[in-house]
Amino acid sequence: MTGAVFLLFGATGDLAKRKLFPAIYSLYREGKLNDRFAVVGLARRPRTNEQFRQDVLDSIQEFARYKADDDAGWASFAEHFSYMSLDIHDVNGFHQLRALTEELDRKFDTGGNRLFYLALAPELFGDVSFNLREGGLLDTSGYHRLVIEKPFGYDLPSAEKLNTQLRQVFEEKDIYRIDHYLGKEMVQNIEFVRFANAFFEPIWNNKYIANVQITLSETVGVEERGGYYDKSGALRDMAQNHMLQMLTMMAMEPPSRLHPEDIRDEKVKVLRSLRPFASAADVRANVVRGQYAAGEFKGKTLPAYRAEPSVAPESTTETFFAARVYVDNFRWAGVPFYVRTGKRLPVKTTEIVVEFKNVPDNVYLSRKHTLEPNLLVFRINPLEGIYMKMNAKQPGSEGVLVPVALDLCQSSKVGINTPEAYERLLYDATRGDSTYFTRWDEVAHAWQYVDQIAAAWAELGAEDLVLYPAGSWGPQRAQELLAENGFRWWPVNGQHEGEVEWETGTKAEAKVLR
Ligand SMILES: NC(=O)C1=CN([C@@H]2O[C@H](COP(=O)(O)OP(=O)(O)OC[C@H]3O[C@@H](n4cnc5c(N)ncnc54)[C@H](OP(=O)(O)O)[C@@H]3O)[C@@H](O)[C@H]2O)C=CC1
Ligand SMILES: O=C1O[C@H](COP(=O)(O)O)[C@@H](O)[C@H](O)[C@H]1O
């Protein structure tokens, strides 16, 4: 890695504490960050360097994969961290920041490279960018990269406005828009599994695939983020970004080169092929929105969304979103992609299920048996791995056909050393690899799609908003979306039952699960 000074705006905030400090430490421990780096923590509240280093240590001990258990090792890492109190509206402060950065540049030989990480409310992104330029922070010969957090706007017009502000200071190639799902191991693995296996690519189309199901379910409610979430809702918080990104990874054409721009070009083509909604009635027929009411889960009473802190008592914000989405291109014509996400659902999981079409039903086996469809499942979170469900003869029996599972559970192999999404993304940003960051046209097309739904909801009022008990799988209508096409949601989070599991390992053996 070439050296760099990381200027971390929002260094006293939640994201820095839970994700960014641990990620920097893991990269350091794994040798992906050499000694040519410095981190400047920036926020308004006063902290001395010592207090800041203690904050970093506390965060690492609580959240990082590696613990700081060696005093000498810790001291040499901590020496790279400084803190400066700065209000992003104070341009004079940026002049002081320039002086501090130049000093660190010399001390740690970082070659004038600067990575500006904005762990701040998005309303501040534009002002920070202008002040970085005014303060002379961009007047070096090294690279100047801007890493920004979601949400990137509230709708297409606000995203365009924000983008225009950023582009007055930074070139598109230097803007790294984070979608932390793109940093997840198994999301990155989608293209490897698809494009490196001869037996998948030929059948990855509407001739063989019946439907694709993407689930991002959470057990948590809105916690202390009610103020933000009530203005956002599941559509803007999860669907516009994480969900559509995963859909593009599943649906994109193989890029001609493994170059970031080629991959992102292919993803944009998918977003451009999403079938638009014809009317509010069309949205109503294909989209489900729900909000959690009070409920009980595992013996615990859970409050209604409207009773959560900072949420309006009459709020109509959706905490559940499901949709039937079509990608109108040659490969995917007629194949529904079902997506769902929600808070206060029964399990925390992210999974993508590909359901294949059955063999013709007039052949011997399917006439004699009820065939379960083949499934390919990408387990993204919390289990990581690939799961395949197929049909085979039950060992030893007399011609009994049973569904069997091939479970390649990566989390049990890699264990706690799976690099966190933020580690990968931060590492990529230092290397100048933007593959797993979202380019502006991806963001714009995603907003365009989502804005149609938001507009229809505004037109419909709250008439299609369904309350669901906290701890349930959301509105019944989300089941009907699939039933209308003769499908059902497959169980997620390793809850496939009644199958024979073929364990992987040196000796493959079959066992009946129940
Ligand atoms: N937390 C998370 O898990 C996730 C967060 N994000 C995004 O990351 C960003 C940060 O989130 P999060 O850390 O949770 O937010 P917090 O509210 O916890 O932190 C905000 C930070 O901004 C600083 N800040 C606020 N105003 C100013 C100002 N005028 N000048 C300088 N610093 C300022 C605060 O410090 P001080 O008050 O001392 O100035 C604080 O360090 C947001 O865009 C959020 O949407 C995205 C995904 C997940
Ligand atoms: O971006 C967000 O993601 C989290 C879920 O992330 P995960 O990695 O834990 O699956 C979600 O809770 C939050 O509302 C949203 O802003």
Image: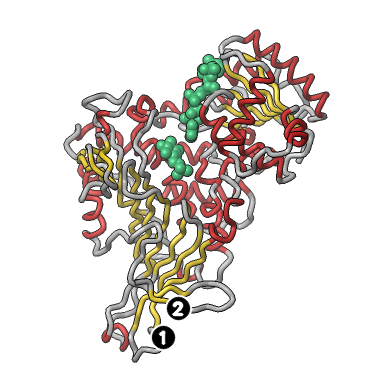
Q: Which residue is mark 1?
A: 395
Residue 23 marker = none
Residue 334 appearing in the image: no
Residue 419 vertical placement versus 57 (above, below) = below
Q: Residue furthest bottom?
A: 398
The residue closer to the viewer here, 205 or 190, is 190
* Amino acid type at image mark 1: Pro
* Left or right side of 409 for 52: right
* Pointer 2 with pointer 1, Cβ within 8 A: yes
Residue that appears at 20% across and 40% down:
467
Q: Residue 48 falls in which quadrant of the image?
A: top right
Quadrant (top left/top right/bottom left/bottom right) for the C terminus: bottom left
User: Measured from the top left, where is residue 186 in percent x and y?
Assistant: 52, 54
Residue at the spot x=27%, y=38% of the render?
A: 302
Quarter of the image for residue 81 reads: top right
**Dot 2: element:** strand
Q: Which mark is residue 510?
A: 2
- At label 2, the amino acid type is Ala
The quarter of the displayed image where residue 236 is located: top left
